[in-house]
Amino acid sequence: MRMPAGSREFFRRLRERAGAWAVRCAAPLLAVLLLAACTSDEPPPAKKDTDTKPPPPVQCEVCEECAVCETDPVTACVRECGLVCEGDAACASVCLGACGTVPEPEDDLTPPETVIADGPPSPIDLTSATFTFSCNETACTFECRLNAGFWFGCYSPGTLDRLSSGENTFEVRAIDAAGNVDATPAFWTWTILSAGGPGGSPSWPVPDSGQQTCYGNAAVIACPAEGEPFAGQDAQHAAYPMSFTDAGDGTAIDAITGLVWQREDDDTARTWGDAVLYCSGLPLAGGGWRLPTSRELQSILDYGRAGPSIDLSVFPGTESAYYWTATSHAGDAESAWVVLFSYGYVGPLKKAEGDSAYVRCVR
């Protein structure tokens, strides 16, 4: 059937409009269809086993005691052990705690042990004393006391001042971090002599003078009986005869005073200051030497001899000359007492005005 000319035109226009509509409407519809095609009711494929495994355990690099740390404590373990502590015992404990394997600490019931490493020689004429002490544990505090007095907190090294002459005893005890106290304190006993010149009294017995002959006004005489002229001389009153023992190491031990002497001096005259330094640095027989006090040096004078007034079998090479003492002159700080071994004279000598004397050390 033929359509009128006007009808054909109508349908041509209708087809054109339908095509434009299809383009505008088909794109959204296609997107819906594609989305539906990609959507499924089936569950997604399972992840691989490696995706669900926890991270591998981490071992502390430094604290070997911490074997393996689990996930939660890893940070603490690595921070405390791997980066800071460098394997010491305290860190190991922290690391073990992070791993959950730290043992319960045991109560410390063992008291520390106290040791005095150094103190003053004896006898000495100084009224101060310095001590060095320690304990056998890493963290100790200390308490000290003098002559069984009250205990007081102290540190090493420590110095006591204004001490009294005579015998003194210093004690020190350690206290550890757990509060345990050393029940057997370390102690140091020494004797302080009277200082200030030849007028003081030593704390040990005074050795005999060495004289075994009696004298009149101008000559040797037979020792007189009691009540006779010149009775009561040194030769008639022997109480502590001088007695020395050769120790075989360059030293001699005085059986009366307990002092240990340098047998032979080095035949060198020095100023007083150099004499003090010489004795303090003398390495003979292990060291520990000092310049003797006036009373100490007089104790080895033998007034039964002259030129020199000393037993040369004990002290060979002694000069008939002045020997320094550590005792300063109370009335003249620029002078110190010396002993003249040619015949036993004791007097002052300037310390630093060109005067010099020989040196025999003691300990």
Image (cartoon, helix red, strand yellow):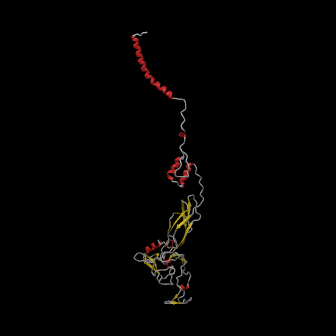
Give the answer, above or below, for where 7 lies relative to 208.
above
Q: Is residue 278 visible?
A: yes
Q: Nearer the viewer, residue 116 or 142?
A: 116
Specify whether residue 152 is in view: no
The residue under the point 40% across, 14% down is: 10
Q: Position of residue 229 (x, y in %)?
A: 53, 90
What residue do we see at 40% from left, 13% from top? 8
What residue occupies the far front of the structure in this picture? Answer: 1
Q: Position of residue 5 (x, y in %)?
A: 39, 11
Q: Residue at x 43, y 20 (%)?
A: 21
Q: Quadrant of the N terminus?
A: top left
Does residue 157 lie above or below 206 as drawn? above
- Locate residue 146, reporting x and y percent: 54, 68
Is 72 situated above or below 223? above
Residue 148 versus residue 296: which sits nearer the camera? 296
Residue 230's spot in the image, x, y percent?
Answer: 53, 88
Residue at x 45%, y 23% (from the top left corner) = 26
Q: Nearer the viewer, residue 278 or 1?
A: 1
In the displayed structure image, the side of residue 265 where residue 225 appears, left or right = right
Count of numbered tags:
0
